[in-house]
Amino acid sequence: MIRTTSSKQLTIAEFDWPFETALDKHNRWVKLSECIPWDELAECYYQGMRADRGRPLKDARRVIGAVIIKHKLCLSDVETVQQIQENPYLQYFVGLPGYQAAAPFAPSLLVEVRKRMGEAVFEGFHRAIIEAHEGQKPTPTKLETPPAAATPAASEPKAAASVTAPEAEVQPEAAEAALDFADKDGVPSAPEPEAPAAPRGQLILDATVVEQAIRFPTDLSLLNEARELTERIIDTLCKRLKVTDKPRTYRHKARSAYLAVAKQKRPGRKVLRRGIKQQWQYLRRNLSHIEQLLAPIPQGSPLPLPGWLLHRYWVIQHLYQQQWDMYRNQTRRCDRRIVSISQPYVRPMVRGKLDKPVEFGAKLSVSLSGEGLAHVDHLRWDAFHEGLDLVSQVEAYLARYGHYPERVLADPIYGTRANRDYLKQHGIRFAGKPLGRPKRETEANREQLKHDKEQRRQEYLQRIPIEGKFDQGKNGYRLNDIRAKRANTSFAWFNTIFLVMNLLVLQGIFFALGQCRLVGLLQMIVRAWKQKISNLRTHSNLADPICSSLPQLIY
């Protein structure tokens, strides 16, 4: 059977408009918006901003919601604004009062937002999520504990003691507390800091590298890019300084020499070294021309170059010296090596992986709580030993939760002697292999050693959630493809990805709590019916078969 339809497009007036009905309350964006603490996030976003100066800011929920949408759906800035403009659910999520056909803001605003979001802002976001998470935890006493079948005579004294307690019993305690904070002269003194609560919970630590979206760097390609930028600098200076006799740069010959080596699939060592020397010599010639053009400009005067090109000119001078030192010493490494002219802060990270022995990006020290909330504790663009961050990460856990973790799960690289001594002083157990020579196995301790070994294995397997968190961020939210162009915007980029993952954890707990309350309510109803049936069986004249079948009917 063949069914044909007309290819004539309907007019917009003839199109069926479904928005006359109410929005679906079970939509994923509606559910996510219900569990996000918007007011607390807005307070953290506004901190450090002046309320009496500057232009009026966009609403914090609108901005934060747009950032969450961008990283949850892995969209560009322009596509994010267009999606919000077209989707009523996204407009509800960002806090608009109703559907509007105009764009909520310009896409360039997201760049400015990433510049504003610093470390203090994301730390406040994380604390707000922790407070919301603690408030959404189900209490077992309300859901699982059956109602006490106490008689009125037994319950009245307890209520009376709690409600009508005499004030004379409270005032002496308050007076003693006031005297404790005063010295001998009666002058009030500052109270001593309270000791932290008993350690509980667990803390999982690990480090990873988040890669920047840069071209794979080679010495030949970097020198060629630097040469092309210096040629552009020469053209700009000649135009702005009105130089009629432009210096000779041999750009066509330099380009041909570069392509002659770059097009080879596997150039030999001598061919590659000769090509690098040629590009370095062309670059040296261009830099000397630039110095001659800038010589007539008085010292202290601004250079006639745009900001972005002037920044690259400074980077090229460092790159030129690094490449010359490596060529002269016949080595492939140098300190603080530049691998991207546009992003000179990016460093190579030697990871030793089979598919990626070297990664280019920032290295993060991440901590994961037992509830699944991840936080970026440290970020560095240079390689570092992540084991040295354990103390600061444990202290940050104390500041956020008010108590130390009961145990720390981490790689063996974290198990240094200094870290173990610190954890032992605070009553924290490090889930790892003990240092020193293994104990000799005897008949007396054989079972204990076997038990300890199995316990270490099980605890080491419990580190898997943080590896899964890295995998979720890199494969699901492009944590391994950071496309920001500045160091501070890159920081906001991957912190927002961790924010999105934490919000999803909060959403799961928020809606799981509703299910727990429903299950708890059903359990309480079943217990009440069972109590009534037992009383009915005791005092009623019904036949035993009927009474015995009632509990089965309830289930």
Image (cartoon, helix red, strand yellow):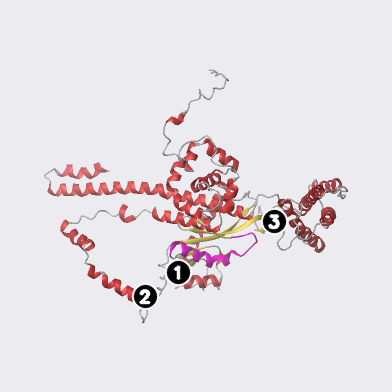
Q: Nearer the viewer, mark 1 or mark 3?
A: 3
Relative to 279, is 423 on the left or the right?
Answer: left
Work out whether 457 lies above or below 312: below
- Which mark is first along the chain, 3 or 2? 2
Relative to 244, is 27 on the left or the right?
Answer: left
Indicate the position of residue 6 as horizontal and vertical percent values: 56, 18
- Whole-angstrom CA distance, mark 2 to mark 3, is 56 Å
- Looking at the rendered structure, the kind of residue marked 1 is Gln
- Any magenta on residue 381? yes
- Looking at the rendered structure, the kind of residue marked 3 is Pro
Figure quadrant of the C terminus: top left
Which sits in the foreground, 452 or 231? 231
- Whole-angstrom CA distance, mark 1 to mark 3, is 54 Å
At mark 1, the secondary structure is helix
Categorize mark 3 by other alpha carbons within 10 Å: few (<14), some (14-19), many (20+): some
**Label 2 sits on residue:** 181
Which sits in the foreground, 211 or 483? 483
- Which mark is first along the chain, 3 or 1? 3
At mark 3, the secondary structure is loop
Q: What is the residue that sits farthest to the bottom in this orientation?
A: 184
**Label 3 sits on residue:** 344
Which sits in the foreground, 244 or 535? 244
Residues drawn in magenta: 379-402
- Which mark is first along the chain, 2 or 1? 2
Q: Nearer the viewer, mark 2 or mark 3?
A: 2
Confirm whether residue 493 shows in the render.
Answer: no
Indicate the position of residue 374 as horizontal and vertical percent values: 51, 56
- Any magenta on residue 483? no
